[in-house]
């Protein structure tokens, strides 16, 4: 399994995307966020997904250079139709637009529909926290195939339905909380499959509803379990709220469309801290709060207490120096795709 620098991965991702029809601007945004996920340790949302996106372009499920259209708007709200464009590009623009509204109106909210996979959710609220604002985002895959069984159920009925918050602070790394409402993101199952690894108990059930640690059961009629283990009704409840905000409020609906087109619906909200408190005072208190958490004596089996987002920050520092591990199956898939486009000799494999 090679270790590859983020710079090389970025060049490879951009080259493949442009060859598949993306503009250079689109490819730059996608690669930045996509490889950014690898850097912080979320390999499930990293370059392993680039071949999948290219397959979706070929199938007509992603439309490069699609128009970005506002279908409804007030001074504090926006509804955006991405027209099946790259989710990274559509959502990046949507968050930046929402931030600008919050600068003027102090609070702003946006829904986005008809876009492809948006990658790591934290990428977007972090744009707002860098501007001195609190931001949240939820995402749901519309009526594309589902992966998560509701608590007590034996079949998938929900998406992994992630939710994320980012908070401005004076910490060295960002304070950000990004989680799936399932026991694990579906992408982590794909990574385990590619690496030939088992997954922890409590993540999966097979097609008969029996617990399993074999990641391959997910694609054979199995399902992910909701967050919470024996208290999984909490994860199911959170997933239901995310589905309502990102699926029903956006108009994407629920259930499964037989065509199976991936369609990320998003709800995002941005709050200008200065409308509630002095920003510098707030950032100082958030920093003190994080240090207060970190000063907690570690429990047996733990070495340290981390504030939300710190593990990813430390992982990024390491991977910027030592590179990103890429499973052999993914590396070969990228090389084969480059060969198919006739650009293998132009990319830094």
Image (spheres, grey):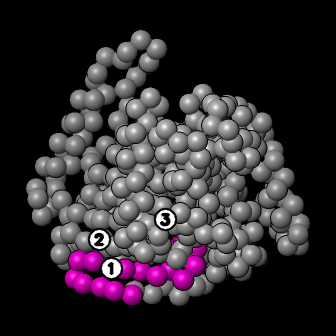
Residue 74 painted magenta: yes
Q: Quadrant of residue 328?
A: top right
Residue at horizontal 66%, vertical 69%? 258
Q: Which residues are magenta?
A: 71-89
| Mark carried by residue 78 | 1
- What is the x, y in percent for residue 27? 63, 72
Task: State the CA–CA distance, disc 2 to disc 1.
Answer: 7 Å
Report if residue 245 lies within the magenta region.
no
Assess disc 2: are there few (<14), some (14-19) or many (≥20) residues with their C-alpha within 10 Å of its C-alpha: many
* Residue at numbered disc 2: 109
Sequence-first disc among 1 and 3: 1
Q: CA distance from mark 1 to mark 3?
A: 22 Å
SS state under label 1: strand
In the rendered image, is residue 219 in sight? yes
Task: Name the residue at 27% across, 77% down.
Answer: 77
Dot 3: what SS? loop
Of the two numbered discs 2 and 1 on the same chain, state the one appearing first in sequence: 1
Instruction: Looking at the picture, tell me which residue is in the foreground, 230 or 246.
Output: 230
Badge 2 marks a residue whose secondary structure is strand
Q: Nearer the viewer, residue 311 or 158?
A: 158
Mark 1 or mark 3: which is in front? 3
């Amino acid at each position: 399994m090679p270790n590859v620098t983020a710079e090389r991965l970025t060049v490879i991702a951009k080259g493949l995307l442009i060859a598949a029809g993306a503009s250079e601007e689109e490819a730059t945004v996608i690669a930045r966020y996509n490889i950014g996920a690898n850097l912080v340790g979320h390999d499930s949302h990293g370059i392993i997904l680039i071949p999948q996106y290219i397959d979706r372009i070929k199938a007509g499920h992603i439309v490069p250079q699609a128009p970005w259209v506002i279908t409804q708007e007030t001074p504090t709200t926006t509804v955006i139709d991405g027209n099946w464009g790259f989710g990274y590009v559509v959502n990046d623009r949507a968050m930046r637009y929402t931030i600008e509204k919050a600068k003027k109106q102090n609070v702003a909210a946006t829904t986005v529909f008809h876009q492809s996979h948006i990658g790591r959710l934290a990428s977007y609220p972090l744009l707002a926290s860098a501007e001195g604002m609190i931001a949240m985002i939820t995402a749901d895959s519309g009526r594309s195939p589902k992966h998560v069984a509701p608590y007590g159920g034996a079949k998938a009925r929900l998406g992994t339905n992630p939710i994320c918050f980012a908070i401005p602070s004076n910490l060295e790394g960002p304070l950000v909380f990004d989680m799936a409402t399932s026991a694990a993101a579906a992408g982590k199952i794909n990574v385990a499959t590619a690496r030939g690894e088992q997954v922890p108990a409590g993540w999966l059930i097979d097609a008969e509803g029996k617990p399993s640690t074999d990641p391959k059961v997910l694609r054979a009629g199995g399902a992910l379990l909701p967050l919470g283990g024996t208290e999984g009704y909490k994860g199911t409840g959170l997933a239901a709220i995310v589905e309502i905000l990102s699926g029903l409020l956006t108009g994407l609906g629920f259930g499964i469309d037989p065509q199976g087109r991936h369609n990320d619906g998003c709800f995002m909200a941005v709050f200008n801290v200065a409308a509630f408190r002095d920003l510098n005072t707030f950032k100082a208190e958030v920093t003190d709060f994080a240090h207060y958490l970190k000063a907690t004596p570690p429990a047996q089996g733990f070495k340290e207490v981390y504030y939300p987002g710190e593990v990813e920050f430390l992982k990024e520092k390491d991977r910027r120096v030592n590179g990103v591990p890429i499973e052999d199956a993914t590396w070969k898939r990228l090389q084969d795709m480059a060969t198919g486009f006739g650009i293998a000799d132009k990319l830094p494999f």
